[in-house]
């Protein structure tokens, strides 16, 4: 079908562009490992499924006809992104404060073996269950209602209005496979030992950058 190749190319480039999903999977992989990051990726793809289905059944037209619906979705998404980013920044601040208190008390005179790589605790000290990782990915993706606008514009420009539902279903499967392959590959790559060691050495800086990114994305979403 003539529209499949252009659609696949545009979607592949879109799904690979950095955004909240990318940041969530990257941080989860470095902090909690491949299994948790894969669950986060599955949550993200589940959210993508929701947006694609809604766009295919015409919710984009509803949002355009009733702008208040779009505003409510955007505000809710922005609140989640800002709140999640603020939570990350708060945990970074608490960890740094605890480390300073530990140093001032003299407790660091006999460092433990697991502290040689830096002040950030091992990722195993703060495990993230598969269910929690999945919910994180789902919430991160669903919190970005811009996806509905993206899919609506993509489908309206590339798909003929009289396309059969079986063909629409095939397009849905194709897009989900592309997203799943990319995000699982990202989860695997970010959980490799070099990046894990980097996180163990500079975890506070990485978490601070991730938290700030979520806050900025939420603010931008709110102001659009």
Image (spheres, grey):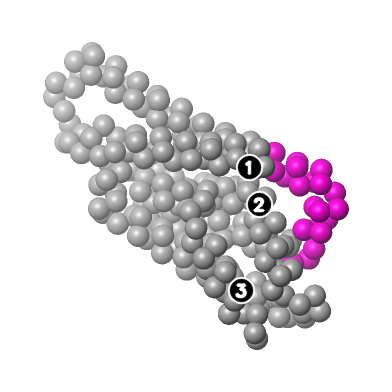
Relative side of 72 to 186, left or right = right
Looking at the picture, tell me which residue is in the foreground, 155 or 203.
155
Disc 1 to disc 3, C-alpha distance: 25 Å
The residue beneath circle 1 is: 221
Question: Is residue 167 placed above or below 132 in the rendered structure?
Answer: below
Residues rendered magenta in the picture: 56-77
The residue beneath circle 3 is: 7
- Image quadrant in which you'd find residue 186: bottom left
Q: Quick one: label 2 or label 1, which is nearer the N terminus?
A: 2
Question: Which quarter of the figure is the N terminus placed in?
Answer: bottom right
The residue under the point 34% across, 36% down is: 205
- Image quadrant in which you'd find residue 10: bottom right
Q: Residue furthest top?
A: 105
* Mark 2 residue element: helix
The residue under the point 66% across, 59% down is: 150
The residue under the point 60% across, 40% down is: 220
Looking at the picture, tell me which residue is in the foreground, 87 or 212.
212
Disc 3 to disc 2, C-alpha distance: 18 Å
Relative side of 97 to 57, left or right = left
Q: Quick one: label 1 or label 3, which is nearer the N terminus?
A: 3
The answer to whether residue 119 of the structure is visible from this angle is yes
* Mark 3 residue element: helix
Where's residue 188, x and y in %?
A: 37, 60
The residue beneath circle 2 is: 146
Q: What number is the disc on residue 156?
A: none
Q: Quick one: label 3 or label 2, which is nearer the N terminus?
A: 3
Asked if labels 1 and 2 touch by Cβ distance under 8 angstroms, the answer is: yes
Question: Which quarter of the figure is the C terminus placed in?
Answer: top right
The answer to whether residue 39 of the structure is visible from this angle is no
Magenta stretch: dominant secondary structure: helix
**Is residue 218 magenta-colored?**
no
């Amino acid at each position: 079908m003539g529209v499949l190749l252009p659609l696949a190319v545009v979607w592949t480039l879109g799904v690979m562009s950095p955004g909240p999903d990318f940041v969530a999977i990257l941080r989860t992989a470095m902090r909690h490992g491949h299994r948790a990051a894969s669950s986060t990726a599955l949550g993200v793809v589940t959210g993508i499924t929701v947006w694609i289905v809604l766009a295919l059944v015409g919710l984009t037209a509803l949002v355009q006809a009733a702008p208040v619906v779009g505003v409510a979705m955007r505000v809710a998404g922005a609140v989640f992104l800002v709140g999640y980013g603020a939570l990350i920044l708060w945990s970074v601040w608490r960890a740094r404060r605890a480390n300073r208190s530990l140093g001032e008390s003299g407790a660091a005179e006999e460092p433990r073996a697991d502290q040689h790589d830096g002040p950030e605790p091992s990722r195993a000290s703060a495990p993230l269950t598969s269910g929690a990782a999945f919910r994180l990915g789902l919430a991160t993706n669903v919190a970005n209602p811009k996806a509905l606008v993206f899919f609506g514009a993509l489908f309206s420009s590339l798909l003929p209005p009289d396309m059969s539902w079986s063909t629409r279903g095939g397009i849905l499967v194709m897009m989900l496979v592309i997203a799943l392959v990319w995000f699982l590959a990202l989860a695997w790559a970010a959980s490799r030992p070099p990046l894990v060691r980097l996180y163990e050495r500079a975890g506070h800086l990485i978490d601070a950058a991730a938290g700030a990114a979520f806050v900025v994305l939420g603010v931008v979403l709110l102001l659009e």
